[in-house]
Amino acid sequence: MLLAVIELIGSGEITQNRIVFDDALKQCYLACFVPLASAANKPNSHHPFFHLRSEGFWHHKVRPGQRESYQRLSTASSPSVLNTHIAYAYLDDALFELLGNRVARELLKTSLLQNLDEEARRNILRPERGGWDWLECEFLVGDYIAMLERELVGAAYTKAEHRRVLQPKLNNRSEGSIEFKHQNVSAVLLELGLPYIPGYKPAFNYQRQLKQVVLSYLAGHQPLLDDVNRAADTASAVTDSQVTWDSVFDPEPPERVPSVAETRPSYLARHINFSERERRNRELGQLAEAFVLDLEKQRLTTVGREDLAKEVEWSSQKRGDGLGFDIRSFDAQRDEERFLEVKATHSGKYQPFFISENERSFSNEYAAAFRLYRVYTFGTSPRLFILPGAVERHVQLLPQSYQARFSG
């Protein structure tokens, strides 16, 4: 039965983690069964579909109202009994993601049919033309996630030391190659709506296998997603009195990166998007606004405009949300107002952010005066870059919610 499932995943017949007991599965099961069975074996596909539930990786989605009857079953005496009680089967998330990779499927199929030693397994996993094999990608992703977990809690780590320990496991690949692969992992996490290590600038030209390894790792390490949520819920105040405009300002906003359609597996969808969670973290937003407020006053004072510094206003606090901006400041040379919208993240400068329709509209109507201040790595070593004018000049805006009206 597992061989049949592997074949159907490979052929594209199964694309979601839902294994239905249908004609396609039964026919594929029969094709796998005949070469392996003895004369005494019967091709009753409903039996393994049912009894695989005793294995830890195979699960049944029980039909509504059938739970008690299902729990009393010791076997499925016929296909109709099975279909009465079970809507479909599904695998552990980590296993399903693993089976999305051709090499991993081949390894598992061969392992089911014969005993493999370490060298045989490595030969199956080894790609053509010297590319990274699955095990190398697994080692690297595990190392990246270990660093990311320390990054999320503000703990110290050394990238160079991690590379030194990792290198012997990666066929002694160069440090530059390892560095770039870490950047690839950043890109994958960013596409999945997860935070990344700011020191590894996302590099989107990655092999498909790497994304499959990342997804498999996340599926098998669900507590990591809880750590991500806790990080997004955290609001750390900046207490360094030495922070200055010059030390914080980043004159280079992110360049445009390739547009990639998001594909969030169900087990990721069950965990809230990191950027969305930060948007709901009102304390984080208020601390970041207070941080920018102080920086603006400092900036104006430094250039001799104490008069303007005294008039900088925390508008969202004084006049309430919904203005389309958070802080009213000034251009020191022209004595003109500047309307600042503050967006903060604990992650890096490429982390997506949310913007309301009101903020977008305001940035267009008052484009000459509008500035979006994107504060990043806020909880550790805050930096910020500025997007002047209409927001859509700088970013791609994707619809995330809609207003529903009862009108024609």
Image (cartoon, rainbow, N blue to C red):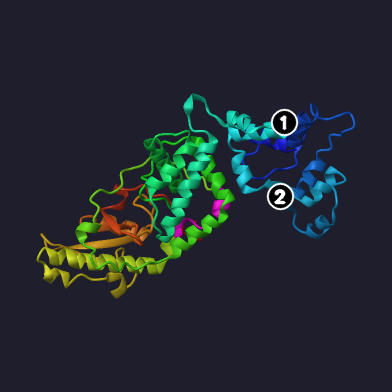
Query: Magenta region: which residues?
Result: 265-277
Label 2 crowd bin: few (<14), some (14–19), many (20+), radius 10 Å: few
| Residue at image point 76% right, 29% down | 31
Of 317 and 174, the residue lying toward us: 174
Residue occupying the far bottom of the picture: 318
- In the picture, measured across the screen, residue 210 lies left or right of residue 36, that is left
Q: Amino acid at mark 2?
A: Gly
Of 141 and 10, the residue lying toward us: 141
For the residues labelled 2 and 1, the Cα–Cα distance comes to 22 Å
Q: Amino acid at mark 1?
A: Gln
Q: Position of residue 268 (x, y in %)?
A: 54, 52
Give the residue number, with chain letter if any, for mark 2.
56
Residue 25: quadrant of the picture? top right
Under tag 1, what secondary structure? loop
Residue 367: quadrant of the picture? bottom left
| Residue at image point 71% right, 32% down | 115
Give the residue number, with chain letter if any, for mark 1.
114
| Predominant SS of the magenta segment | helix
- In the picture, measured across the screen, residue 153 lies left or right of residue 323, that is right
Can residue 194 be seen at all in this image of the molecule?
A: no
Can residue 23 be seen at all in this image of the molecule?
A: yes
- In the picture, measured across the screen, residue 307 lies left or right of residue 180, that is left
Q: Position of residue 381 (x, y in %)?
A: 31, 59
Q: Nearer the viewer, mark 2 or mark 1?
A: 1
Q: Position of residue 332 (x, y in %)?
A: 13, 62
Under tag 2, what secondary structure? loop
Residue occupying the far right of the picture: 40
402 is within the stretch colored magenta: no
| Residue at image point 12% right, 70% down | 306
**Residue 6, labelled with which disc?**
none
